[in-house]
Image: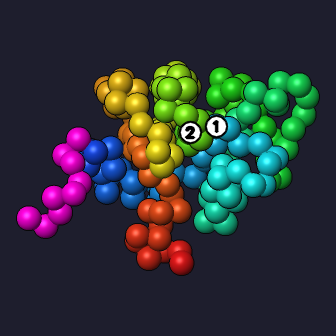
Amino acid sequence: MVNDTVSPSTTHWQDEDVIAFLLDQCQTWAVVGLSLDQTKKAYEIASLLQSRGKRIVPIHPRAADGPMEVLGEQAYPSLADVPFPIDVVDVFRRSEAAGEFADQAVAVGARGVWFQQGVIDEAAFARTTAAGLLMVMDTCPKLQWRKRGVID
């Protein structure tokens, strides 16, 4: 056996073709949970996405309190408030809270959903892919770019 440590149930969450499409072809990434806190993983990954030429769109409920910018981009309180198309919804929330953002991604017509490392919701994966969106779970763009030799 080449790799008997990867269970069949998780391999479809991390389909290499889906990952490649989202990373290579999708430009506008809504980052759910992105705030001004530079110590958070969402900030680190959003900054990396920008360095790779992606447009990031911060999604954070505090944006409802007034104008808010993160990494030079206007933040919005929800995906529904974003006035332009979103390619990927990148979710930095606990597994039990992440599914609602996959549903919102479907509602706004996003092309894909990315649940960060440690975030798994099989029911959300089933709903999202059944609606025609691409989705990956339990991984990170940084990790995937590193695996592909794109970054150190």
* Marks 1 and 2 in Cβ contact (< 8 Å): yes
Decide if residue 114 is in sight here. Answer: no
Q: Which of 39/58 is in front?
A: 39
Give above or below for 98 relative to 8.
above
Task: Write the residue at 50% across / 26% down.
Answer: 96
**Residue 131's x, y, as percent?**
36, 25
Residue indicated by mark 2: 91
**Residue 19's x, y, as percent?**
39, 54
Residue indicated by mark 1: 32
Task: Write the residue at 71% across / 43% down.
Answer: 34
Q: In which quarter of the image is the C terminus?
A: bottom right
Label 2 sits on a secondary structure element that is strand
Q: What stretch is highlighted in magenta?
A: 1-9
Task: Write the residue at 82% across / 47% down.
Answer: 36
Looking at the magenta stretch, what is its main secondary structure? loop
Neighbor class of circle 1 (other Cα within 10 Å; few <14, some 14-19, many 20+) is: many
Image quadrant where residue 4 sits: bottom left
Mark 1: which amino acid?
Val
Mark 2: which amino acid?
Val
The colour scheme applied to this rendered structure is rainbow
